[in-house]
Image: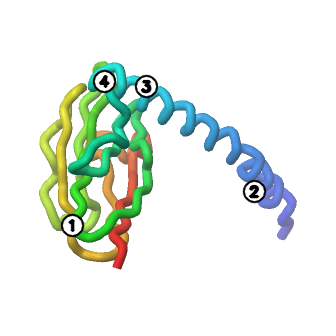
Amino acid sequence: MTTKPLLTAVLALVAALPALADETDQICAEAEARYVELFGEPSDSAQDAEVVLMYKYNFCPARITVKPGTTVRWVNVDKRTSHSVLLKDGSQPESDRIFPEESVEMTFLEPGPQDYLCGPHWETQNMVGMVTVEP
């Protein structure tokens, strides 16, 4: 059995990672600019919740860490696409569709990681994220 094709594939993937990170950073920068355009202030200025933006089939940021009792607000800043939020463990029902300029909130109480996804886009667009609640 030869490992050269596998090694070549792994090296190609590793080489592509910085480009993928750059693309995600660019999408999230666009999402933040859109949020400011819509709401007149940066997303991190929200006092009552941690904000995660939904834009171009991405959660921005895709991973956040919060203290117990924190509310996370997902805000759709896309121009035409609706999204939803579904906790992967099924502990809460999937949110209604969140249309552009709408949001949904969930409060996280239990420590540990909580995977979530966009119901209509997780399989085709890999639209997934994680909230980690500190102990």
| First in sequence: mark 3 vs mark 2 | 2
Of circles 3 and 2, the one toward us is: 3
Q: Residues within 10 Å of mark 2 (few under 14, many from 20)?
A: few
Label 2, secondary structure: give it: helix
Tell me: 27 left or right of 73: right
Residue annotated with mark 3: 33
Cα separation between marks 3 and 2: 35 Å
In percent of the image, x 68 and y 47: which residue is there?
Answer: 17
Can you give x and y, in whole percent of width and height, for residue 29 in the image? 50, 31
Cα separation between marks 4 and 3: 10 Å
In percent of the image, x 40 and y 63: which residue is there?
Answer: 65
Quarter of the figure that contains the C terminus: bottom left
Q: Are marks 4 and 2 in contact (CB under 8 Å)?
A: no
Cα separation between marks 4 and 2: 44 Å
Q: Is residue 54 above or below residue 94?
A: above
Quarter of the figure that contains the N terminus: bottom right
Residue annotated with mark 4: 40
Amino acid on which disc 2 is placed: Val
| First in sequence: mark 2 vs mark 1 | 2
Label 4, secondary structure: give it: loop
Quarter of the figure with residue 37: top left
Of circles 4 and 3, the one toward us is: 4
Amino acid on which disc 1 is placed: Gly
| First in sequence: mark 3 vs mark 1 | 3
Cα separation between marks 4 and 1: 27 Å
Q: Are marks 3 and 1 in contact (CB under 8 Å)?
A: no
